[in-house]
Amino acid sequence: MYSGKTKSVCPVCLRVLDAVKIERDDGIYMEKSCPEHGDFSALIWEGDASSYLAWDRENVAVEPPVDGKKPEKGCPYDCGLCTEHLRKGCCVLLELTSRCNLGCPVCFASADERESREPDLEEIGKQYDYLMAHGGPFNIQLSGGEPTVRDDLPEIIRLGGEKGLTFFQLNTNGIRLAEEQGYAEKLKKAGLDTVFLQFDGLNDEVYRTLRGRALLDIKLRAVENCIRAGLGTVLVPVIAAGVNEDQVGDIIRYAESKMPGVRGVHFQPLSRFGRCELPGAERPVTIPRMLRLIEEQTGGKMKYSDFSGGGAENAYCSFHASYRRQSEVKLKCLPRRSGCCCTGSDDSRTSVAEQWTGAAKGYGESAMTETSSLDEFLRITREKTLAISGMVFQDAWNLELDRLRRCHICELDGDFGMVPFCAYNLTDTQGRSMYRK
């Protein structure tokens, strides 16, 4: 019977606790006890110990943060990044606003329509400078709130390019992209590479539950407008137990039908931080459950065994596989990169940028044999691939400090610096955060 030691936090007070990972009949659980608030148990893996341990790949590479801060309180209280952290960072979120034109029942940023202090261009320029001085260039995720509520978004993107940043991704609900003619082209011209589009399913019932209103038509129009503008598009479904697990296969098939404009699907099982008005699921969506849903709902076209865990990040944070289209009905799983268990942050940053950037226009199948440029050949070949991936964020119930120390997705905060995403958004049972204002 498997048992492993780790460290976590109390969901009520966020104090650091010793925790154990225990194998039970239906999976691996994390169990911990707070002297003030009692015992807590959370399912972290559906499967036996052999499948859990096999998923892990030893990754001993260490990339210390540039000018990391010396910790005083210890992980997770001194992020920014501190010298105990094992990654220098890969992707960095810049929250441009806390305003949003939706009021989703599920929102890690607890965003709404209220007025907020938004960094002006001068402050954003200083943020870019900070990132370049602390290990940049990083892949920049422009986030919020809803970043498209800012009319100066094109200027923000252009400024980042002038400062030396090379890849810009927009995290968005897609409303403005769907409704404003020419807006996608304007962002593309400014230097935007990829749209990370909130896309939870292919019926309006799902959107009413997760987003508070019917949005399917808006999502479909946003995809078409992004493709027309040459923006790489990644569909990002939040998968909530009992809400849209049955939508996994439909989302993948829709993504296939929109290749090469749609570059991938990036699943995010629901994590309980920020605003989460849905009742807690008895069994959260784990990596094994996600992979079984993919295999079952694609009829075995995509298999559990195709996927592997994270390279630069902790293996239990993510899953990934890439597929090449061989015909309109056939996809081939590409072999995993040799040595990927030692992938560094820079390798990860480059790989993500290459896969998710918009496809080139004007190339047909014949171009595959006519090109005289190896780089062009590789680019066209890449455009025949679809990435299926996912990120399993940690909340106060299942947080492991060992996983957190390998995090390479950060939020930039003017007071704290670069804070790992799962630390920045960590909230207790009352919605209180250690970092987020």
Image: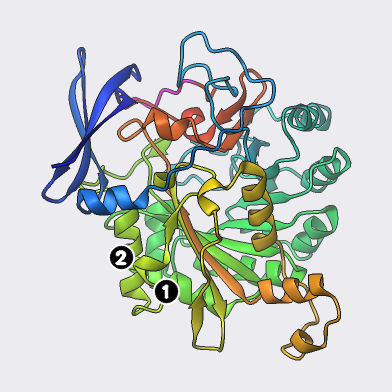
Foreground residue among 309 and 396 = 309
Q: Position of residue 256 (x, y in %)?
A: 54, 77
Q: Position of residue 55 (x, y in %)?
A: 35, 52
Assess disc 1: are there few (<14), some (14-19) or many (≥20) residues with their C-alpha within 10 Å of its C-alpha.
some
Q: Does any portion of residue 436 appear in the rendered image?
A: yes
Instruction: Please give the label number shown on residue 292.
Output: 2
Disc 1 designates what residue? 250
Q: Is residue 415 left or right of residue 245?
A: right
Residue type pointed to by label 2: Arg
Tag 1 near tag 2, CB within 8 Å: no
Classify 10 Å Cα crowding around label 2: few (below 14), some (14-19), many (20 and above).
some
Task: Give the number of the disc on residue 266.
Answer: none
Of all residues, the one furthest to the left in this rendering is 25
252 is higher (above) or lower (below) than 391: below
Q: Is residue 132 left or right of residue 437?
A: right
Instruction: Identify which residue is drawn at 54% across, 46% down.
Output: 342
Identify the residue shown where x is 57% and y is 77%: 324
On-image quarter of the N terminus: top left
SS at circle 2 = helix
Q: Residue 106: which quarter of the image? A: top left
Q: Residue at x 21, y 12 (%)?
A: 36
Residue 227: percent from left, percent from top: 69, 71
Give x and y (percent) for residue 193. 74, 57
Please give the range of residues in magenta.
Answer: 430-434
Please report whichever mark, 1 or 2, sits nearer to the chain's N-terminal start: 1
Residue 216 appears left or right of 143? left
Name the residue: 47% across, 29% down.
423
Q: Is residue 343 magenta?
A: no
Is residue 431 inside the magenta stretch?
yes
Q: Secondary structure at mark 1?
A: helix
